[in-house]
Structures are given as structure tokens and as C-alpha cells.
Amino acid sequence: MRSARRVVRATGAAVGLAMASLLLCACASQIDLPTKDSGLRVRIQSSAIAPGNGGELIKADALQPGDILLTSVATVNSFGIRLGTFSPVSHAVLYLGDGVVAEAVGTGVRQRSIDALVDDEQMVVAFRLPGVTPAHVEKLRAWSFSQVGTRYNTVGVMLDAPFVLNRRVCELPLIPGAVRDFCVRGFATVQLGASRNDQFFCSQFVLEAYNQAGLPITATDPRWVSPADLLHMREGDVPSVAASQPLRYVGHLKYNPPPTITADGATTR
């Protein structure tokens, strides 16, 4: 009897520790109801994204126009974004075909080669929205190229910093998806209402390009969506912001694992 009580206490402590960990990281969750093929399942939002956990390294020729590239780079700004969003990515880029990408950066919207992007970034991972047709691609390209030179949405990024922190309340475990989406929208309406929609930051630009092409990725205002939100729209993950359909993982164009520190203090990869 005493042994059974110890097992119950240990199990309870383990469950409590797991719940506390989830609360601290504010990991969104989703409960999948039982089906004839599987039982009740609770899925937790995941930021794991590396070739070693089921992914693969690909070449640029595997990309298709319209693919969304999520990246990170070894800079203070990138680290701050990743830390604030609990995500391994900090930037979103749109691939337009012919080896060209378009992106919104601090100097404004620009185009550059996919090779330059891969050389500069620490990690580049590609996702694909199903259902993209040649007609959509034509509109994506035309609108994206027409926006080259458009100013960066600096105000939107500045307003996004407190929003990213406050919205974590909406992403606590076991909050239903509809409630989570309503909560995020509520915070965004209050905190991001002054942001401009004629200037762009990275993920805003990608989402607006798809809106202009007539194939919206989400009904949520692009000014409210971060690169981390796009990452969690992938198949098998739990989105914080509702998506029209999950994004399909294409592969990693580049992946540098984070450095590890050995017992003697040396840094290795």
C-alpha cells in the first residue's frame, strides 16, 4: 500500500512538473478527439526544426515559386526575436522562382538571389502552401516586384514587442483553438491598431503577397503574424493563429546546429 502511494505521489509530481513547464513556456496545445483509429490525443506546439528530427537537407532547385522560407541569422536582433517568440526562426522570405527571393528588411522591400540568402543566414527552411497555381504565382511575382523599395514597417515591429509577450497568455496549454485565436485577435486589436498596412515587416509582406494573389494563408491581419506563427502553421503542429490550411515542409536549404559547450568550456558544433 505504501509503495502504491509513493507511485501515485511520484506520478502526480511528474504531471505537475510537466504542466508547470508547459505554463512557463506557454505552449499552445490541441486536443484531438478519439477516432476509430486512435484514442484521445493531446498535441503540444513544437519549435523543434532540424534535419535530425525527420527533416532533410535540399538544394535550391527543389523550391517552387511561392515557397515560404523561414530563417535565422547570428545577430542580436535575430536572437531577440527568437527569444521573444520562443522560436528558432526570426525572418520570413518569399521565393519567386528563377533563383530570386523577395523580403522586407530594415532598408525596405528588396529582391536578391536565393544563393545570397543561403550564404548570409544561419538556417533556411522551406514550407509550401498547397494549391498554388501558375496564376497565383504570376500575381505573387507581379505584386512582390512592384513593392520593391517600399519602406519597412518600423512602427509595426516596435508595437509587436509588447504584443508578443502579452499574447503568451492566450497560448497557455489546454486553451481551445477558437478561444486562443479570439484572445490573440483581442490583444492585437488593442495593441497593434496604430500599425501601418502600407509598409511591411517580413512576415507581413509574405502574407500580404498571398492575399494579393487571391490565396490567403490566414484570415488574420498580416500585421499580427510573426515568422514564428508561420512556423506553427506547418502540418502536425499547433498553430497560435488559425490558418486556411497547413503549410507543408519542403526541406532545409541550410542548417547549422547551435553550438554546445564542453566540460572544459570549449565551444563545439
Image (spheres, rainbow, N blue to C red):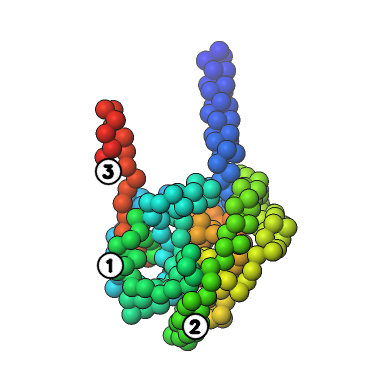
Which residue is at a point 69% across and 57% down the rendered structure image?
A: 191
Task: Say which element carries label 3.
Answer: loop
Decide if residue 2 is in sight here.
yes
Q: Position of residue 242 (x, y in %)?
A: 60, 62
> Identity of the amino acid at label 1?
Lys
User: As displayed, is residue 49 above or below residue 214?
Assistant: above
User: Quick one: label 3 or label 2, which is nearer the N terminus?
Assistant: 2
Quick check: marks 3 and 2 in contact, CB under 8 Å? Answer: no
Which residue is at a point 36% across and 76% down the rendered structure image?
A: 100
User: As displayed, is residue 74 above or below residue 59?
Assistant: above
Task: Tell me the crowding category of disc 2: few under 14, some 14 to 19, or many 20 or more residues within 10 angstroms, Cα based.
Answer: few
Q: Quadrant of the N terminus?
A: top right
**Cα distance in 3D space between marks 3 and 2:** 41 Å
> Identity of the amino acid at label 3?
Arg
**Cα distance in 3D space between marks 1 and 3:** 22 Å
Which quarter of the figure has residue 9? top right
Q: Residue furthest top?
A: 2
Task: Identify the residue position indicated by label 1 in the image.
Answer: 59
Q: Residue furthest front?
A: 107
